[in-house]
Image (cartoon, rainbow, N blue to C red):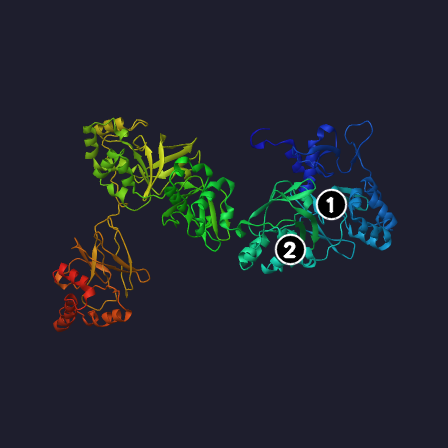
Amino acid sequence: GTGMFAMTFTEYVLQLVDSSAYDKIVTHSRIRARKEGPNVCALQQVEGTKKKYFSTFLPTLEILYECCPGYMKLDGMKGCPAVAPIDNVYNTLGLVKAATTQRYSDISKLRQEIEGTGTFTVFAPSNEAWDELNPTARAALEDNVNIELFNALHYHMVNHRLMTKDMKNGMTVTSMYNDQGILINHYPNGVVTVNCARIIHGNQMATNGVVHVIDRVISSVTGTIKDYLESEEQLSSFNNAAFIAGIMDKLDQPDQFTLFAPTNEAFDKLTPGFMESIFENEPVIKALVTYHMLNSVQCAEAIMAGSVYETEEGSTIEIGCDGDSLTVNGIKMVLKKDIVASNGVIHLIDEVLIPDSAKEVRKLVGKSQSIFSDLVSEMGLTSSLTSDTQYTLLAPLNAVFTDEVMADDEYLKLILENHMLKLKISLSTMFNGQLLETLSGKLLRVFIYRTAVCIESACMVRGSKEGMNGALHVMTSLIKPADKTTFELLDADGNFKIFLSLMETAGLGDLLRQNGSYTVFAPVDKAFEALGADDLDLLKSNVNALRNILLYHFSEGIIISGGLEAKVTNLLKSLQGKPLQLKSENNSIRVNSVEIPQSDLMATNGVVHVVKNVLYPTDLPVGHQDLLLVLQKLIKYIEIKFVSGFTYAEIPLTFIKRIVTTTHYIGVPETKTVIIKEKQPSIRTVTTVIEGKPSIKQVTRVIKPSGSKVEVDHATKTVTRVIGRQPNKVTRVIGGKLRKNLRLENVFIICFVSPKQPRKYEKGLFAHSVPDFSKITSFGDNPALLKEESGKITRIIQGEFPYLQICKDLAMDQHD
């Protein structure tokens, strides 16, 4: 078949069989071997062992062909054309080549029971399984066949028929020996285990039950994993760690766990003092212990090479096979496997597994970032990376450290410091626009995209790690903090003079200077080379048209090349309103099919991508022939439509930030000194009280000429500014609202400057020297009171308190 109804023969047959994973894998094995004749199954043998599995056709394993369960060969005929005869359980043991189990049934007087009436399930150890049993244990069974051997065989039996399709993962069935439980696991790969013994030949029907051949002798289970840890002296170190971590109670619960338990010898291999250093850190010791635990039962026989499992700690480990041995994270370390407890299975290992969360961050740096790690040590920066310090490393790949980068030690040290953050910043806590402070004091911006997380123009490689005192993120390139606005960047380059001139003509120059986050597609001067002086003058004369064209080169938000999803058109809304189409493919970036030869020029207020053509919306027409001729010279990658009389829509310039200063309403000031730089003209806000007692809204506004100081109380939002020259503009604030109709002579100037004097002196000033406006309800009602309070201001201005000379200066500026 074709199309949506297409289905392979294998898929079709698998849909017909029972949903049991074991049954599916047997059916799949039969299909694989159909060229060998009817009812033949393909099996794979693990190299160097006798283990055979129904085929999944791993290329490294040897393929064998045998009769599928329940079928037999006939002389001279291809395949396995005969059905095995059905008989009672005792005789069926002989058919499935479990001769030792059959013999033991005979001598232990079990034969009469399994030949008679009833329904039984027998998990029959293969002949090889009996041979592998500990000789002492086997001898004990044979020495007491009527009790010990009889009881052992009864533990391998269930008093009803149980097919593999009935065996659910994690279920416990009741055996015929003292009703003790047998743990069943049925794995997705088709492996079914009984107390971790694998069923190697299942579902052999008998008249009074069913026989499943297993690969080892099983024994009864009574204790939990906790019980086993406490009883084994060789596990005392891990037992102690689990107790400190508060995990022992969990290991006593009726659940399903796998524990990779390190022996005492494994702990002896650790760096001296390591365990002692983390015993006081409960989260770290808990992480170490739970890294050895899986929240499921993983018997050795069910584990396929390269299997990855999530641990209780949260990260993953890789468990594989090396012949008969298990490997953990690629290391052959399992000493003893499949110690079955009532709530799971234990594998003894000879090395302690240490998760990233129990390591110092510096220990997480991998080989691909080794140059960064080496340079941090060489430059003497490791003193900032102690085990009791929280930090984050932004480790670039080795390839970014070129000869040019390595040429200047001072520059290199600054680069390294800009890749080290003062706090632990995990990937899960990052958000778009977040500012991260580096060791050098620089601020880095975080950008979150659909398929990438980037810091400035460098993006992260998958695989961030968290250590016990910080985090590690691997970066594709060097991080360079921006230090210029987009205007300063373009102006300093010198190749964008026409673009900058047009921006100023259109009244959009502030867009390149103001704070914000913009993506700018900046056309170089050569993009305008087809235009003459008259053409440019015509373009400048139509400001509305010019704004439409220029604003189509801007998009709000910072989009860098590393944040683009490859081979997908990324739509950006321009400030003009029409969408831009940005696409990354074959190591190149295009916007509206126009190539971007230079990208990711980071500015403090955005990012610049250089284009060699002026951009224009494909569906935006032109309404005047003379402008059409100019645009046709300028824009050749699309055909511009002409619609007679069409006029460009006027774009509201709401994104231009005309005022960037802030008025701070204060309570009682407690000041600290910082420096604030302002790009826009300052506005001074002055408090006055008119008609009524206001709630306390004392405001001292800020005027920032060069070199003046600003004092800020971060706790109370208090700002006091020192005025160095007469301001250009005065705005009055009354009750939190602006009033512009006050007479200047009715304005009182309140100036609170925290002196560098003892606190007692400062309190005295506030208590006795500050005019009390709460007494005044109107400037016209009580001239005497007004005169008294004004007198206090006069005394201040006349220098009664020398450190308030600034208030005098302020008052003289106001001629009052």
Q: Secondary structure at mark 2?
A: loop
Q: Which residue is mark 2?
A: 255
Q: Secondary structure at mark 1?
A: loop
Q: Position of residue 104 (x, y in %)?
A: 85, 48
Amino acid type at circle 2 is Asp
Q: Is residue 406 left or right of residue 639?
A: right
> Residue shown at 26%/57% (left/top)?
710
147 is higher (above) or lower (below) than 577:
below
Q: Earlier in the sequence, mark 2 or mark 1?
A: 1
Q: Quadrant of residue 400?
A: top left
The image's mark for residue 383 is: none
434 is higher (above) or lower (below) than 572:
below
> Residue shown at 11%/60% (left/top)?
815
Q: CA distance from mark 2 to mark 1?
A: 24 Å
Q: Position of residue 489 (x, y in %)?
A: 29, 39
Counting other residues with Cα less than 10 Å from the Cα at mark 1, is it few (<14), some (14-19), or many (20 or more)? some
Q: Position of residue 1 (x, y in %)?
A: 60, 28
Counting other residues with Cα less than 10 Å from the Cα at mark 2, is it few (<14), some (14-19), or many (20 or more)? some
Q: Is residue 125 left or right of residue 683?
A: right
Q: Is residue 749 visible in the rendered structure shown here?
A: no
In the image shown, does 84 or 778 lie closer to the viewer?
778
In the image shown, does 629 or 284 lie closer to the viewer?
284
Q: Which residue is mark 1?
A: 163
Amino acid type at circle 1 is Met
Q: Is residue 379 visible in the rendered structure shown here?
A: yes
In the image shown, does 516 or 381 lie closer to the viewer?
381
